[in-house]
Amino acid sequence: MPNARSHKMYGKAAFALIIAFLLLLTYSIFIGTVDIRSYFLPLLPSSPPPVVQSLCATTSPPLKVYMYDLPRRFNVAIMNRRGTDQTPVTARTWPPWPKNSGLKRQHSIEYWMMGSLLFDGNGGDGREAVRVSDPELADAFFVPFFSSLSFNTHGHNMTDPATRIDHQLQIDLLKILGESKYWQRSGGRDHVIPLTHPNAFRFLRPQVNASIQIVVDFGRYPHVMSNLSKDVVTPYVHVVDSFTDDDRPDPFESRTTLLFFQGRTYRKDEGIVRVKLAKVLAGYDDVHYERSVATGENIKSSTQRMRLSKFCLHPAGDTPSSCRLFDAIVSHCVPVIVSDEIELPFEDEIDYTKFSLFFSFKEALKPDYMVNQLRNVSKERWIEMWRTLKNISHHFEFNYPPEKEDAVNMLWRQVKHKLSAVKLSVHRIQRLKIPDWWRRRK
């Protein structure tokens, strides 16, 4: 029989093992490798992943941005060509965006980004970018040229003699940038330039290839000119009014139209799908597919009809994206996206599958297929998507003054994400004797 001394030794060993186990368990819980709820509370429901997952900590300092003091002819003077003042605009002299601008509004991202830097209020904790007066302190440089508005204003039909004004503005801007030591230092890589219209900066665009471009998609550009690795995808500025009082008791039943589309049907490139969809979607009583142009009255009509529709169709236009998607989002009408090449804004933070449906060209053009799929969406699932749209639509609103988590602040956060790769490139260029040595290897 074991003696008392042996019992004492076994007891000490057992006690030591228990202590070691408890220490290991405590450490595992602390670092997150063990979820104690899965052992002791297995019936607790797990929380669903959020639709929006912020990649930046709330305590992350705002981006420090230096904005070039360009004469007004590069920006706000294009909005009002009667003005003669060419001194750089300030927060005190910042004009409101004109109410009767029609479709020019959809490409006005340049205006809202510039305004966000001019705004001199504190902006609370939601400011993702602040203006600095000393370029030596800047993380990035903003070029406040209204390139899209310039194209839309100075000879929009491409052959008008007024296009010379747009061309000259591009020439003059490149001269200013070329003389800047900060542009020279990085080759423009840390410079942010909004170029949302497909024809913005069309005469000299290759000369700003290296910059961080703010674009709506990549439909017209070769990969070497614009791509996701360096550029930021922005939402269009919606042209319909936001549905701010969407509080009907039964939103599913009150939206009597199954699928809604109103817009141009004859488009270039991928947009040819619109003509084909008109034939595929003909004959359904609860599908509204109308060819129209964007007049003031038609925009008002579209606003009301989107609010009475369960699903809003977003086929590709001249490029893979269009303003219609963001009109649908702020109308809380579930987007039906038909495009094989679309890129979406803020997709590293927002999961579009939670509130949108996607169809390839092939699927959408199959007779009855898309409509049947929409009819099979249960009321419960649609309500869930509708609620999600209401919760995320503020991320697609452009405001002045800027508001926390609105579209402008989301864009500046996206710019912040790009800067690590920019700094790596700039630092390597500064020290390499043969900048492209890796391309010379066989």
Image (cartoon, grey):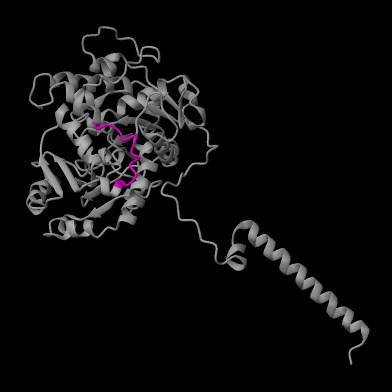
**How far across and how far down the image is residue 72, in percent?**
29, 14
What residue is drawn where x is 38% and y is 38%? 395
**How far across and how far down the image is residue 325, in percent?**
25, 42
Against 403, residue 376 (above or below) is below
Please give left or right for residue 333 compared with residue 157 in the image.
right
Image quadrant where residue 223 sits? top left
Against 167, residue 81 (above or below) is above
**Is 38 in front, or is 234?**
38
Magenta stretch secondary structure, dominant: loop
Residue 225: tell me if it is visible: no
Please give left or right for residue 20 compared with residue 148 in the image.
right
Residue 274: tell me if it is visible: yes
Q: Is residue 250 magenta?
A: yes
What residue is drawn where x is 20% and y is 56%? 360
In the rendered image, the quadrant that contains the C terminus is bottom left
Image quadrant where residue 237 sits? top left
**How far across and how far down the image is residue 171, in percent?**
23, 21
What residue is drawn where x is 29% and y is 21%? 97
Counting the numbered discs, the total is: 0
Task: Read off the magenta span.
Answer: 239-251
**How far across and how far down the image is residue 379, in percent?**
30, 55
